[in-house]
Image: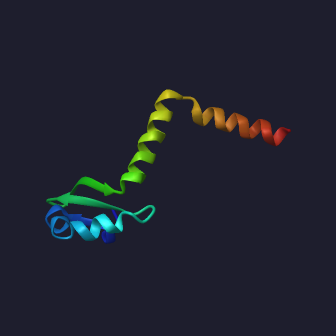
């Protein structure tokens, strides 16, 4: 966990407006802890939607990584 973006839930509660503005930046997220253990992650809604779409595609096409590798190999061969 990155100490810069890891906060206790209590600290996050105090800074929720700053955090909500900060996560709008691409790739920025916060890990929230309770008793020092990771409990939740806050990220932008846009980034969450992107992750959700990626996971859905990976579930629908389980051989996607294999297909991509085969396509790259075929492309290199010409």
Is 73 drawn above or below residue 19 in the view shown? above
Residue 25: % across, % down: 42, 66
Q: Is residue 35 above or below residue 63?
A: below
Q: Is residue 22 left or right of residue 70?
A: left
**Snapshot quadrant of residue 78:** top right
From the top left corner, tell me how far across and down residue 72 is, in percent.
73, 40
Q: Position of residue 20 (x, y in %)?
A: 29, 64
**Residue at point 17% right, 61% down?**
9
Residue at the image position 24 percent from the left and 68 percent from the top = 17
The front one of 23 and 8 is 23
Q: Residue at x 31, y 70 (%)?
A: 3
Front residue (pair 25, 76): 25
Q: Residue at x 84, y 39 (%)?
A: 77
In this rendering, is residue 74 above or below 4?
A: above
The one nearer the camera, 8 or 37, is 8
Which image quadrant: the N terminus?
bottom left
Residue 37 sits in quarter: bottom left
């Amino acid at each position: 966990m990155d100490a810069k973006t890891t906060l206790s839930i209590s600290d996050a509660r105090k800074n929720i407006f700053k955090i909500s503005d900060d996560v709008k930046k691409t790739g920025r997220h916060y890990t929230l802890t309770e008793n020092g253990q990771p409990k939740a992650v806050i990220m932008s809604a846009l980034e969450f939607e992107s992750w959700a779409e990626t996971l859905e595609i990976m579930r629908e096409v389980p051989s996607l990584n294999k297909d991509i590798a085969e396509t790259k190999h075929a492309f290199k061969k010409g």
